[in-house]
Image: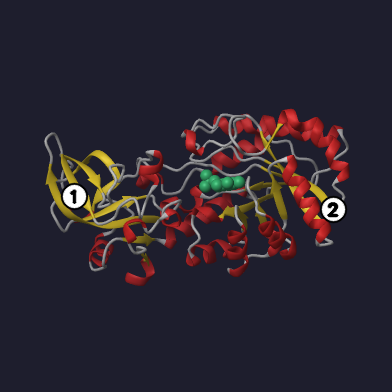
Amino acid sequence: MSQFFEPKLIKALKDQPTPFYYYDLDVLDQTLQAIKKAVGDSPYHIHYAIKANANPEILKKIKSYGFGIDCVSGEEVAAALKHGFRVEQIAFAGVGKRDDEIELGINAGIFTFNVESLEELQVIQEIAEKLDSEVNVALRFNPNVNAKTHEYITTGLEENKFGINEWELDELFELMPKLKRLNIRGLHFHIGSQITDLSVYKNLCNRVNDFQQKFRERGYQLDHINVGGGLGVNYDDPDAELIPDFERFFNIFKEFVHLYPRQRLHFELGRAIVAQCSALISKVLYVKKGVKKNFAILDAGMTELIRPALYQSYHKIQNLSRLDDDTDHAYDVVGPICESSDCFGKSVKLPESKRGDIFAIRSTGAYGEVMRSNYNLRKDAKTIYKHEIL
Ligand SMILES: *Cc1c(COP(=O)(O)O)cnc(C)c1O
């Protein structure tokens, strides 16, 4: 049995044309409530990383909890504004902001640009002068902390492209007085994604305190510190942990980050908020016997969900048509796309499966639908919310 899929729901799902993204907004609600509870009365502010999932219903729910938005493109800034997020709750990060994206952020009057290089600081200064504006910025530093996650989603090591490096600090302190149009409001860090070893965050806190100390010694008062996102979720066994352990996560920051009076700590959670509220639902088109193994060929592929092909990520796969049967067969679960990397899982333990069975690929709420493509000229998969079919 699965608490995510009750029998009545499975029956309703079977009537829908596949493949589609299924969303359970009750799970999202419970997740958001858990965050609120874990934050308590700490001076913490959550910016949802909209790049994880930008579905209107998801955004509406997140907005209702008073969260802000973390953007990594001008298009995301525009989307956040369109969906009614307040402009003073929008942060804009990214190593490669175009001039027109910077102009859009300045004209809108967003809360802050998270600036990733000295050159970007100078460009924002020039554009602010041209627009005769003042701009709030936070400086994104690369703290050289190992996030102990997949190399493609690690961002906080010196070898990564993100943020200003510690060895650039002297040059930065020389430059800062010349940036007349910029108000340096905070420091920003984001060290990677799908972080499950929480000791990593303790290391980050120590680095945050070091950096903050250096700024205070130079007389800079900062109104916020932004520690980014990256909290991982349980992909192996989603039903055992539909809601991530936010209590443990926030307690690390409560214990180890040194905040000064009136300072606020900002978080940019993406995956941990939305991953578990969705599953990709697909139908078995063919079961093919190979030489050494069998293939279950689905009507969903890497066009719908690219994470397994892109960074070998694991998603739990269930045969919803035979949930109660023994999982005593092994299949390579693959899609129909003309690429050998179009594979959701190798030697997956499943019940003996047949053409027409309905499969669920779990934990697809983050970096699922937003990363889909139309390769092979395939159509966008539909989006179906629980409340529409139950
Ligand atoms: C992607 C990203 C996040 C969110 O990361 P998650 O792992 O989804 O929590 C936060 N901040 C920045 C700057 C990002 O690029």
Q: Which residue is the site of mark 1?
A: 324
State the residue at coordinates (80%, 44%).
222
Q: Position of residue 320 (x, y in %)?
A: 23, 54
Mark 1: give few (<14), some (14-19) or many (20+) Cα within 10 Å: few
Q: Is residue 335 above or below residue 381?
A: above
Q: Is residue 285 above or below residue 316?
A: below
Foreground: 364 or 118?
Answer: 118
Per the image, label 2 sits on a secondary structure element best described as: loop
Contact flag, marks 1 and 2 (Cβ < 8 Å): no
Foreground: 247 or 231?
Answer: 231
Q: Residue 181 has which mark? A: 2
Instruction: First in sequence, mark 1 or 2: give its number.
Output: 2
State the residue at coordinates (26%, 67%).
17
In three-dimensional space, the C-alpha distance between marks 1 and 2, rounded to whole angstroms, equals 64 Å
- Quadrant where the C terminus is found in the figure: bottom left
User: Mark 1 is on which residue type?
Assistant: Asp
Q: Position of residue 317 (x, y in %)?
A: 28, 47
Residue 196, visible in the rendered structure: no
Q: Is residue 32 above or below residue 340?
A: below
Total number of numbered labels? 2
Residue 8 occupies quadrant: bottom left
Q: Is the residue indicated by label 2 positioned so its CB lies within 8 Å of ligand 1?
A: no
User: Mark 2 is on which residue type?
Assistant: Arg
State the residue at coordinates (25%, 47%).
334
